[in-house]
Amino acid sequence: MTNVKFFHLIWLLLTFPFLWGQADTVRFRNPGFEGEAQRGSSRDFYLKDWNDCGNRYFRRESPPDVHPNGIWQVTKPPAEGKTYVGLVTRDNGTYEIISTKLKSRLLAGNEYEFEVYLAMSEYYISRTHMSKLTVNYYYPAVLKVFGATGKCKKEELLFETQPIDNTEWKKYKIRIKPSKDYKTLTFAACFKRGTIMPYNGHLLMDGLSPIQKITRSSDNQIIR
């Protein structure tokens, strides 16, 4: 065996387990929404590895807020790390939405799960466009997770939570099964199902876990 073939074989042996493992674990970039706490009062949104998608869908609406520093009277400590993100729904039918590019691809037909901390604040005081009054955006919002092939797209609804009404951080399990390959996930705060009149609400999000591929046994039980 020549030296070139020998080193090529060694490279394959070293990298194959890594590549194989990548298919089972897909990681977020900046999963803890770490950055500088900031009020989303302009079109500028600076949170590493995350994109504000509101301007794509709703013109003249402000981007999400990064907490905590007392913005809108939100003072809840992070679930982990130093900062977290807040997403609102509005009585004019608009809502806040963000997206991120994953480190590797979610494959069509595979089942995955990950966890995220979600909560709401007792106070989320801001002005509403409809009445021009300062109100508490206290109503519970729903988190929707979309698969996408590009920034800010909403190509496939993968998961929808119940309305987030807990005021203490709670870890939620998100289970998804994409019908296509995706390398972007989009997260939106939305109105609960059956809503006729849009409302001022919000949710807080922190601490995304790695996305793990689910393996099932022949009798359809999850293998941990």
Image: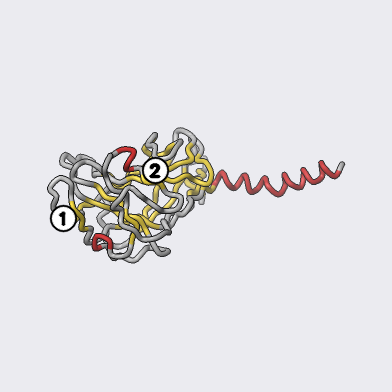
Tell me where residue 32 sits by quadrant.
bottom left
Number of other residues with Cα within 10 Å of mark 2, as a class: few under 14, some 14 to 19, many 20 or more: many
Pick out the residue farthest to the right: 1
| Whether residue 115 can be seen here | yes
| Residue sitting at x 31%, y 65% | 69
Q: Quadrant of the N terminus?
A: top right
Identify the element where label 2 is drawn.
Answer: strand
Q: Amino acid at mark 2?
A: Thr
Q: Which mark is residue 186?
A: 2
| Residue sitting at x 36%, y 63% | 78
Residue 47 percent coordinates (x, y): 41, 53
Residue 130 percent coordinates (x, y): 15, 45
Identify the element where label 1 is drawn.
Answer: strand
| Residue sitting at x 36%, y 53% | 172
| Whether residue 161 can be seen here | no
Tell me where residue 152 sits by quadrant.
top left
Tell me where residue 68 sits by quadrant.
bottom left
Q: Amino acid at mark 1?
A: Thr
Q: Could you say which is closer to the camera, residue 48 or residue 160? A: 48
The residue labelled by disc 1 is: 134
From this view, report whether residue 115 is shown above or below residue 110. below
Q: Which mark is residue 123?
A: none
Residue 30 percent coordinates (x, y): 46, 54
Residue 135 percent coordinates (x, y): 16, 55
Circle nearer the N terminus (1, 2): 1
Determine whether, in the image, residue 74 is placed left or right of residue 14.
left
Q: Could you say which is closer to the camera, residue 127 or residue 158? A: 127
